[in-house]
Image: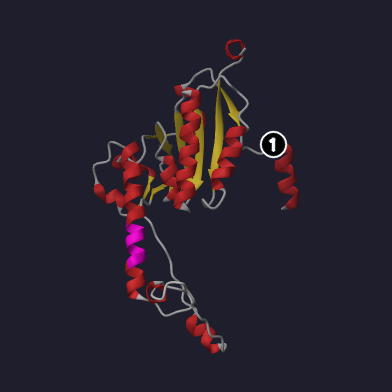
């Protein structure tokens, strides 16, 4: 039956989006889009990315879901950077069989950052005292809690964890982008599209419609995550 459907159904390219900060349940949102794809006769999958990054685990989950879909349907994935595909956004972007961006897109930031905010002095001014309790007698000496003074030993341990995550990020990019030779791209720098192409972070320039029509002439687009005209009107009315 599926073979007959393929014979009489025009092949399609589903187009999905990854937008905004990658946070908890971002992977679920990508899966929701993949589940909405109705066509069985597929040419490829296109992923439009406009994200400054976010949680490393969610970024990895998204990649796993996209790769499973690719393997299931035996199709290529094309990824497109819009305004920005940095950090976790680039983590996802780089898995494309072909990776595209605009000349002005911001791409890269292959790095890991973490912030610490101490509020102990502010609490003291308010007469509030914070106590740290743990089953481990020594853990309070190394953990950098917002309620305590900054602890260099705790910072060192945390940096070790960040470096481990950073190396995983580097290995991930290298596994997909074989032509990167300049190791400076792994120092968390952000590049414009022109620079990104020269450094091997992307393959070429082009908007998704132009690129997909060239790579797969005759395939129709299936807009999975784009709002309907009615939804657009509702958003305009709210504004």
The answer to whether residue 125 is left or right of residue 194 is right
Q: Give me the residue at 37% from left, 76% from top.
A: 151
Instruction: State which quadrant residue 139 falls in.
Output: bottom left
Residue 206: % across, % down: 44, 34
- Residue 12, placed above or below residue 225: above
Query: Does dot 1 land on a helix, a strand or a loop?
Result: loop
Residue 104: % across, % down: 42, 45
Towards the viewer: 192 or 37: 37
- Name the quadrant of the N terminus: top right
Q: Over which residues does the magenta segment extend?
A: 157-163
Q: Is residue 104 visible?
A: no
- Residue 28, placed above or below residue 35: below
The answer to whether residue 177 is left or right of residue 24 is left
Q: How is the image coloured?
A: secondary structure
Q: Give me the residue at 36% from left, 38% from top.
A: 202
Q: Give me the residue at 71% from left, 47% from top.
A: 235
Q: Which residue is mark 1?
A: 228
Residue 119: % across, % down: 50, 79
Instruction: State which quadrant residue 204 falls in.
Output: top left
């Amino acid at each position: 039956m599926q073979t007959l459907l393929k014979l009489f159904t025009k092949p399609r390219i589903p187009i999905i989006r990854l937008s905004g900060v990658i946070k908890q349940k971002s992977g679920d949102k990508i899966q929701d889009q993949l589940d909405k794809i109705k066509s069985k006769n597929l040419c490829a999958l296109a992923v439009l990315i406009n994200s400054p990054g976010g949680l490393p685990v969610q970024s990895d989950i998204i990649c796993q879901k996209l790769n499973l879909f690719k393997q299931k349907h035996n199709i290529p994935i094309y990824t497109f950077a819009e305004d920005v595909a940095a950090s976790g956004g680039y983590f996802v972007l780089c898995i494309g069989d072909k990776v595209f961006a605009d000349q002005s897109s911001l791409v890269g930031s292959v790095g890991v950052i973490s912030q610490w905010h101490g509020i102990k002095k502010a609490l003291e001014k308010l007469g509030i005292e914070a106590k740290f309790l743990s089953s481990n007698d020594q853990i309070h000496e190394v953990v950098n809690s917002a309620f305590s003074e900054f602890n260099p030993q705790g910072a060192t341990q945390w940096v070790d964890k960040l470096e481990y995550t950073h190396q995983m990020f580097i290995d991930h990019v290298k596994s997909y982008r074989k032509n990167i030779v300049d190791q400076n791209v792994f120092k968390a720098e952000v590049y414009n599209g022109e620079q990104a192409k020269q450094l091997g972070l992307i393959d070429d320039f082009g908007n998704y419609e132009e690129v997909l029509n060239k790579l797969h002439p005759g395939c129709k687009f299936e807009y999975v995550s784009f709002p309907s005209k009615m939804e657009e009107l509702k958003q305009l009315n709210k504004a």
